[in-house]
Amino acid sequence: MATSAITNENTLIRAAEASARSAANSSATSASGTSSSTAALTSLADNYTTFLTLLTTQLQHQDPSSPMSSDTFTQELAQFAGVEQQVQTNKNLASLISLNEGSQLTSDASLVGQTATANTTTLPLQNGSASLSFEGSSGQTVAIAVANSAGVIVKDVVASASNGTNTWTWDGTDNNGNQLSNGAYSVAVETVSSSGTTSDVPFTVSGTITGVAKGDSDMEVEMGDAHIPLSDVTNVSSATTSTGTNSGSTGS
């Protein structure tokens, strides 16, 4: 192999591994954080309590010989009422959303057992198998990297794509041939130009839906231990189909 080709391949692998680690870190941060709506409501409730404390303290310690003007007092009471109303509105909205999600949870239960395709960097390893698909051109060099939840690269592959839809199937083994446990992994696909410039390759992952649950901000489908927002799902089918599979050059 020519030196330039080896250099491009090494650059490609490093780029794919960096993207996979970044995706794993983002997933960990998202899983450990609270929802933005919950945080906003908590902040607003805290402001409401603080405002009430300041107002009552101000009334207790005002100068009797020079009390607060009625206009100022009225303005502060109006602000107090506005904050109180906003807190209550947010609570009612949260209750309404919860009821809607409960109804959707019941209707989405029918998805269990079906195969879903999603735009996500989360790769569900189920029963020792996982797959993703991407559009490629004939002879295009791509690198696929898989990271575990700790951001450690467990698998990387460099392959030559074919024209059209390419499907890469992973048998769940790491770079040393060890069988890994089922679960949620992070994946990235990169390509490299003749000048050595790397770029992301859009892809979709596939898996079997094993459950539906409420997420922080969206309904989620469960593919084993992988939780994927329902909004990321692009297709659901009762049977797994593949078109233009390129398992020979992009196998596990």
Image (cartoon, rainbow, N blue to C red):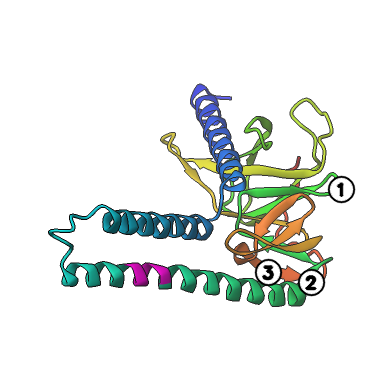
Dot 2: what SS?
A: helix
**Residue in the image at 65% along x and 49% along y:** 122
Can you identify the residue that label 2 sits on?
A: 109
Can you identify the residue that label 1 sits on?
A: 127
- The prevailing secondary structure element of the residues shown in magenta is helix
Q: Crowding at label 1, few (<14), some or many (≥20) Cα neighbours within 10 Å?
A: few
Place of residue 35 in the rendered image (x, y in percent of width and height, measured from the top left): 55, 55
- Lower sequence index among marks 2 and 3: 2
Dot 3: what SS?
A: strand
- Lower sequence index among marks 1 and 2: 2
Q: CA distance from mark 1 to mark 2?
A: 21 Å
**Quarter in which the N terminus is drawn:** top right
**Quarter in which the C terminus is drawn:** top right
Query: Do the CB atoms of the residues marked 2 and 3 lie less than 8 Å apart?
Result: no
Q: Amino acid at mark 3?
A: Asn
The correct choice, above or below, for 89 with respect to 161 in the image is below
Can you identify the residue that label 3 sits on?
A: 235
**Residue in the image at 35% along x and 72% along y:** 82
Place of residue 94 in the rendered image (x, y in percent of width and height, measured from the top left): 56, 69
Please state the extent of the stretch shown in magenta in the rendering: 80-84
